[in-house]
Image (cartoon, rainbow, N blue to C red):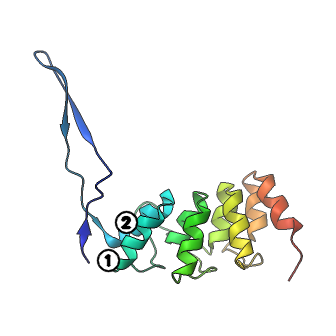
Amino acid sequence: MDAIVLPHVRRCALLAGAWFGLVCLPVPVRAQSAQELLWDAAMQGDTVALGTALERGAAVDSLDTRTNPNGRRALNWAAWYNQPAAIRFLIAHGAHLNLANWTGFTPLHHAAEHGSLDAARVLVSLGADRTMLNEQGQRPVDVARERGHPDVAALLDSLPSR
């Protein structure tokens, strides 16, 4: 896979010196793989970068374990960070709506866990399964209640049973 650098990301190192004061020097940005770009773009809701990542060979349903050993897929990240446009984009490009991570958390579980109401609405409207259980035997509504997100729990409770 090709490594890419995001041109819109700029970083600098601040160096303090007795003679020069503060100086901002550019720091090279580590090149991202297409896969890393996909996950990061999902977090940010950047559908242009999502498209670039997929064009460069990223796997839409790959599991990101960079920061969490349980893993999150791009769709899970978009749900966690309340990114409805990214959710729609990923589903339109083949992401599986109810695919769980290592602990059984689906994108809807992650939206419920983080209190991402708009993401939960979109996931449900696209057909997310509200009855799937994680490894603790919890449905997304149970996770929303446990994590103190009554608005997400109310949304999930208000929907008719299937």
Q: Amino acid at mark 2?
A: Leu
Is residue 137 something one can see in this rendering? no
Q: Secondary structure at mark 2?
A: helix
Residue in the image at 75% along x and 71% along y: 139
Name the residue that disc number 1 marks.
Answer: 56
Give the quarter of the image for residue 89: bottom right
Name the residue that disc number 2 marks.
Answer: 37
Q: Residues within 10 Å of mark 1 (few under 14, many from 20)?
A: some
**Label 2–label 1 contact, CB within 8 A:** yes
The x and y percentages for residue 94 are: 53, 84
> Residue 150 vs residue 5: left or right?
right
Is residue 142 something one can see in this rendering? yes
Q: Amino acid at mark 1?
A: Arg
Give the quarter of the image for residue 95: bottom right
The x and y percentages for residue 32 are: 29, 64
> Residue 135 has which mark?
none
Residue furthest left in the image? 19
Give the quarter of the image for residue 14: top left
Q: Secondary structure at mark 1?
A: loop
Residue in the image at 54% along x and 66% along y: 86
For the residues labelled 2 and 1, the Cα–Cα distance comes to 10 Å
The x and y percentages for residue 77 are: 53, 64
> Residue 150 vs residue 56: left or right?
right
Residue furthest front in the image? 48
Image quadrant where one finds the C terminus: bottom right
Residue in the image at 28% along x and 43% along y: 11
Image quadrant where one finds the N terminus: bottom left
Q: Residues within 10 Å of mark 2 (few under 14, many from 20)?
A: many
